[in-house]
């Protein structure tokens, strides 16, 4: 091996070492700045709460542009407890999840996938334990039924659900718990296509 080859090999090894160090540091920084909720925030949550976020992916960016919403939120789910831990029942497409359709994730995972500081939580008025139990039962029903994701975003087709459609089905159609201002949302289409109805 010539001296020139030795110098090239050493140079390549040094470059690989520097690159590996930078990748490791970036991973540490990402881990240290992971978006989470504070313990005091989690203590305010209840089963049946609606959790909204803006996702980090290209699909969320597309939805954000389509909705043109001032709060800029693109996804939502509903909280239940499983073995004492909060889970988010939601419907996701295969572009953002290994499993498509109605599924659960831990609250921590749901928040981690959000753009930092984009989490908004809303709660039905006059929430009672009986209502919460019914919400949880319906959410678990659709989980067990393995309802697929609605890629056509057709709110009239109840064989597949997109994220907000799942909540409309549970809260309005199944349980009649959601009353919507018909002046603000005069048609089903106008309410199904926005997340704003869940903000109040």
Image (cartoon, rainbow, N blue to C red):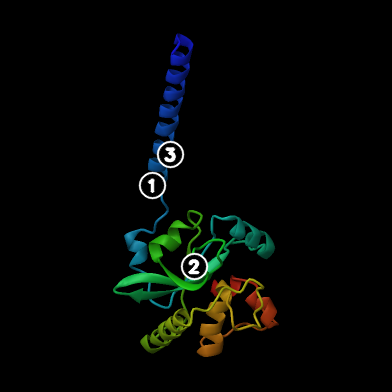
Closer to the N terminus: mark 1 or mark 2? 1
* Residue located at (55% from left, 83% from top): 169
Work out which quarter of the rendered image holds the C terminus and state it: bottom right
| Coordinates of residue 108 in the picture (x, y in percent) | 39, 61
Mark 2 or 3, closer to the camera: 2
Question: In the image, what residue occupies the spot 46% across and 72% down?
Answer: 103
Mark with earlier residue (2, 3) = 3
> Picture quarter containing residue 88?
bottom left
Q: Is residue 178 visible?
A: no
As helix, strand or loop, the secondary structure at mark 1 comes to helix
For disc 2, the marked residue is 99
Q: Which mark is residue 78?
A: none
Give the mark, 3 or 1, whose residue is nearer the N terminus: 3
Tell me the mark number nearer the camera, choosing from 1 and 2: 2
Judging by the rendered image, the residue that carries numbered circle 3 is 26
- Which residue corresponds to mark 1? 31
Spatial CA distance of label 1 from label 2 is 24 Å
In terms of secondary structure, where does tag 2 sit? loop
Asked if the residue under mark 1 is in contact with the one under mark 3, i.e. CB atoms within 8 Å, the reply is no
- Label 3's element? helix
Residue drawn at x 36%, y 86% as measured from the top left = 129
Local crowd size for mark 3, using a 10 Å CA cut-off: few (<14), some (14–19), many (≥20): few
Query: Does 52 sit left or right of 61 as displayed?
Result: left
Residue that extends furthest to the left in the rendered view of this protein? 84
Gap in Å between the C-alphas at discs 2 and 3?
Answer: 28 Å
Nearest the viewer among 69 and 152 is 152
Tell which of 9 and 145 is nearer to you: 9
In depth, the one of 157 and 49 nearer the eye is 157
For residue 99, side relative to residue 180 (left or right): left
Q: Quadrant of the N terminus?
A: top left
């Amino acid at each position: 091996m010539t001296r020139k080859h030795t110098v090239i090999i050493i140079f390549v090894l040094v470059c690989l070492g520097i690159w590996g160090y930078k990748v490791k540091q970036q991973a540490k920084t990402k881990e240290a700045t992971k978006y989470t909720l504070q313990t005091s925030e989690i203590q305010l949550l209840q089963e049946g709460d609606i959790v909204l976020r803006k996702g980090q992916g290209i699909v969320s960016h597309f939805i954000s542009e389509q909705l043109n919403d001032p709060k800029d939120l693109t996804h939502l789910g509903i909280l239940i407890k499983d073995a004492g831990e909060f889970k988010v029942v939601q419907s996701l497409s295969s572009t953002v999840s290994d499993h498509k359709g109605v599924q659960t994730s831990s609250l921590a995972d749901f928040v981690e996938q959000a753009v930092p500081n984009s989490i908004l939580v809303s709660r039905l008025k006059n929430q009672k334990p009986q209502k919460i139990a019914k919400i949880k039962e319906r959410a678990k029903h659709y989980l067990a039924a393995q309802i697929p994701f609605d890629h056509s975003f057709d709110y009239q087709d109840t064989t597949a659900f997109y994220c907000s459609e799942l909540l409309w089905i549970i809260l309005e159609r199944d349980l009649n718990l959601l009353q919507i201002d018909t002046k603000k949302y005069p048609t089903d289409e106008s309410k199904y296509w926005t997340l704003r109805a869940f903000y109040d």
